[in-house]
Image (tube, helix red, strand yellow):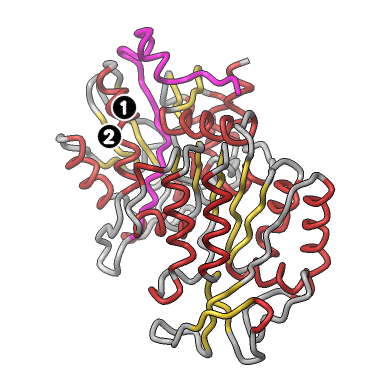
Amino acid sequence: MNVIRFSDLCAQGKAAGQRVFIRAELNVPQDDSGAITEDTRIRASVPCIQMALDAGAAVMVTSHLGRPTEGAFKPEDSLAPVAKRLGELLGRDVPLVSNWVDGVTVAPGQVVLLENCRVNVGEKKNSPELARKMAALCDIFVNDAFGTAHRAEGTTYGIAEYAKVACAGPLLAAEIDAITKALAHPQRPLVAIVAGSKVSTKLTILKALSEKVDGLIVGGGIANTFMLAAGLKIGKSLAEPDLVDQAKAVIEAMKARGAAVPIPTDVVTAKTFAADAVATVKAASEVADDDLILDIGPQTAAALALQLKSAGTIVWNGPVGVFEFDAFAHGTETIARAIADSAAFSIAGGGDTLAAIAKYGIEKQVGYISTGGGAFLEILEGKTLPAFEILQKRAA
């Protein structure tokens, strides 16, 4: 994927004295008092900002936070807690600027945070008028927000159309490289793990992957639907019986290519959905009518771990069981440890997947951890993301 990289512009001295506008992904979770509860995205945005400062640029950074109403700013929409945390990480004061669309005062070597961009009228619908005004604020536009790359909004697409130079920041460039390595030019065998509660939300991904992967591991509620497709009983487990034909089609598509969707041979069941529910391991063929399947069994987990250890590339999206409950976390932990131990290049994405990676402390053993949820899923579907498309167009 050919895009201009901000790191190259900095190395060539082309950012010195320039006004640089960075679209970062600073949409972090907060508690009821507004305090940040998890700052991964802020920490991930620091290298790009520091790169711009070190290059001698006048730096403006913005992001969305939450779901504000355009044109109606409320105190809870403010990036003030983000500005404070960013200042701590950069070791300098980061002033927060409101009403910035018509002009921003910032000198080379300085950084300012521009208030929540989704409050600006026209941001969501990518108004050309807003995009032109934002583009006029800078000499170089840097998109470093992969988490919003699947949206064609003012600060992710429009500004890139009109800015003098539009490029990819280090975080976005790393995503492009990892995605290319995993999906465009993978080391074989390529194994994908797609798990989650519903087939319907991941059906297009399953279909797209069934045409390119050598192994497709399904987990969670999705696996239950595939078990139905294989003629197994699943009791009162979460599933989508109306999508059994679609699941069968994915199984057949894989079979036609000499590949497979492994169906669980054993499962962990409970009578209620609760952290203290009694966990029972049983053969997949012996699920009772009042059973809930909440995890894959140890035999299935061991077989999948073996498959992952011999993979060349692994794409992981979703835990294979209710890993939040320790009694039903064994399957996900086994998968996570197998990915960590594998020599394969691995790329993982999605909120629950990141939570599992953190729970088992395998961050260092995963080849690349994607910062985008929806954007990561759209990549797996084979879609071209708007942010990538406009940066390629500008590079050409």
Q: Tag 2: residue type?
A: Val
Q: From what the image shows, is residue 315 above or below residue 104? A: below
Main SS category, magenta section: loop
Residue 211 place in picture, x, y as percent? 76, 44
Instruction: Report the residue marked by disc 1.
Output: 59
Residue at 52% in and 60% down:
302
Residue at 41% in and 71% down:
324
Q: In the rendered view, does 202 fall on the left or right side of 100?
A: right
Is residue 368 located in the magenta-colored stretch of the structure?
Answer: no
Q: In the rendered view, does 57 fall on the left or right side of 181?
A: left
Gap in Å between the C-alphas at discs 1 and 2? 6 Å
Q: Residue furthest top?
A: 12
In the structure shown, which secondary structural element does the residue marked by tag 1 occupy?
strand
| Residues packed near mark 2 inside 10 Å, few (<14), some (14 to 19) or many (20 plus) | many
- Residue 241 visible at all: yes
Q: From what the image shows, is residue 383 above or below residue 70? A: above
Quadrant housing the C terminus: top right
Q: In the rendered view, does 291 fall on the left or right side of 13?
A: right
For the residues bearing labels 1 and 2, Cβ distance under 8 angstroms: yes
Instruction: Report the residue marked by disc 2.
Output: 112
Q: Tag 1: residue type?
A: Val
In the foreground, 118 or 293: 293
Residue 175 place in picture, x, y as percent? 49, 34
Residue at 39% in and 56% down:
73
Is residue 20 located in the magenta-colored stretch of the structure?
Answer: yes
Residue 377 place in picture, x, y as percent? 60, 49
- What range is drawn magenta here? 1-29
In the foreground, 285 or 274: 285
In terms of sequence position, does the residue under pointer 1 or pointer 2 come before the other? 1
Q: From what the image shows, is residue 341 above or below residue 225? A: above
Q: From what the image shows, is residue 381 above or below residue 22? A: below
